[in-house]
Image (tube, rainbow, N blue to C red):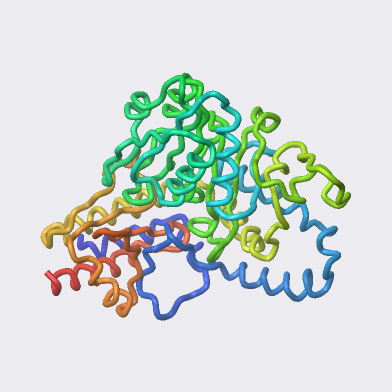
Amino acid sequence: MSLADRAAALDAADPLAAFRDRFLPAPSVVSYLDGNSLGRPLEATARLIDDFVRDQWGGRLIQGWTDGWLEWPLVLGDRLGAVALGAAPGQTVVADSTTVLLYKLARAAVDARPGRRTVVLDTDNFPTDRYVLEGIAAERGLLLHWVETDQATGIRPDQVAEAVDEDTALVLFSHVAYRSGWLADVPEINRIAHEAGALTLWDLCHSAGSVPVQLDEWGVDLAVGCSYKYLNGGPGAPAFGYLRHSLQDSLKQPIQGWMGHRASFEMGHGYEAAPGIRALLSGTPPILAMVPMHANLDLLAEAGIDAVRAKSLQLTDYVLELADEWLAPLGVEVVSPRDPARRGGHITLRRAGFEQLLAPLWESGVIPDYRRPDGLRIGPAPLSTSFTEVHDGLAILRDLAEKHR
């Protein structure tokens, strides 16, 4: 069977194939391989936004706040927790950006461990995570313990065990490494950190909506993530934060705004935090930007995260098959885990000079993601991507790589 026939057979057997028709078409795109960076919009999202602007915002005006908008950060947070995060109600909130929520939760965590002066993080985590902790360390007089991680893999439990001790306040890692797609062993790393008395904060940006997550079961303390990748929330869509119930009374986030107050509309003197997860809010919720989440969570709930994960692994297995057959002879190296138990939703390919292929790839209708110094990330979103689309995109990449060899 040819590789093209194999793609056709996989598409014919795909139980999620019909979901592709729920997304808006992009006529000029042959192969969209960047779902791990920005998800595609749903037809339902376009209808919801139009309805919101015309009927809810245009029709109800400021009355919309009392119609339910004020509760959206918590309502959508609970829905996201149930559909994608394995989180019981009252622990997840939709608000702000990933950067802002990282700051809130990390600052609250280190302040909740007075006397401990060290934060553990890894050298290849996403820049925002590293930059935020550098700033907090400078503010609070803390030390950063950098764990050197291989760019082709990611953080391992044995590395964490060597790094944490009685002086560790917090550890921060990504569940799925943004560069390689390495899937961290969250339960074991949590166990190690907790034995040392440290809190754990996980970045879920590259796993939410793609890889099953069980925050409650895994004993996660805090987590953040974005909604514009596999959750298809659109450019700059709001982030989400998770704070487990047992910590909500003791962790105090530092950006005290009116929406986190126990009685926002009293407009009184002095800040009194709201009970529960609402205290993680600060300013006015980005209601318009939250509209797509209603459609996206409906879609994910219908498909089921386990089915999404199963197709994701099939897609990335197929990417590996094409890479071995077509690209390895051209000097292209796979720098992502081949073990499915340790692989997230994308595959990174590496070859010197890949940056020169970006323009011709885009001109050919193929859109991957590029990460310096020389990596192409292939991120097929399971609900919007076919196996034939992957085949056609990598065939064009193969031809261009041969031409520019």
Position of residue 126 relative to residue 228, above or below, is above
Query: In the picture, residue 46 is in which quadrant?
Result: bottom right
What residue is at 14 percent from the left and 74 percent from the top? 403
Query: In the picture, residue 393 is in which quadrant?
Result: bottom left
Residue 381: give x, y in percent of width and height: 43, 58
Query: In the picture, residue 148 is in which quadrant?
Result: top left
What residue is at 20 percent from the left and 63 percent from the top? 2
What residue is at 47 percent from the left and 57 percent from the top? 16
Residue 303: give x, y in percent of width and height: 54, 52
What residue is at 35 percent from the left and 55 percent from the top? 315
Position of residue 352 relative to residue 311, above or below, is below
Question: Could you tell whether 210 is left or right of 331 in the image?
Answer: right
Residue 215: give x, y in percent of width and height: 55, 35
Depth check: 288 or 20 in front? 288
Depth check: 306 or 35 in front? 35
Question: Could you tell whether 109 is left or right of 291 in the image?
Answer: left
Depth check: 255 or 362 in front? 255
Question: Could you tell whether 374 is left or right of 298 in the image?
Answer: left
Count of numbered circles in the view: 0
Residue 75: give x, y in percent of width and height: 71, 49
Position of residue 309 relative to residue 155, above or below, is below
Q: Quadrant of the C terminus?
A: bottom left
Depth check: 264 or 242 in front? 264
Q: Quadrant of the N terminus?
A: bottom left
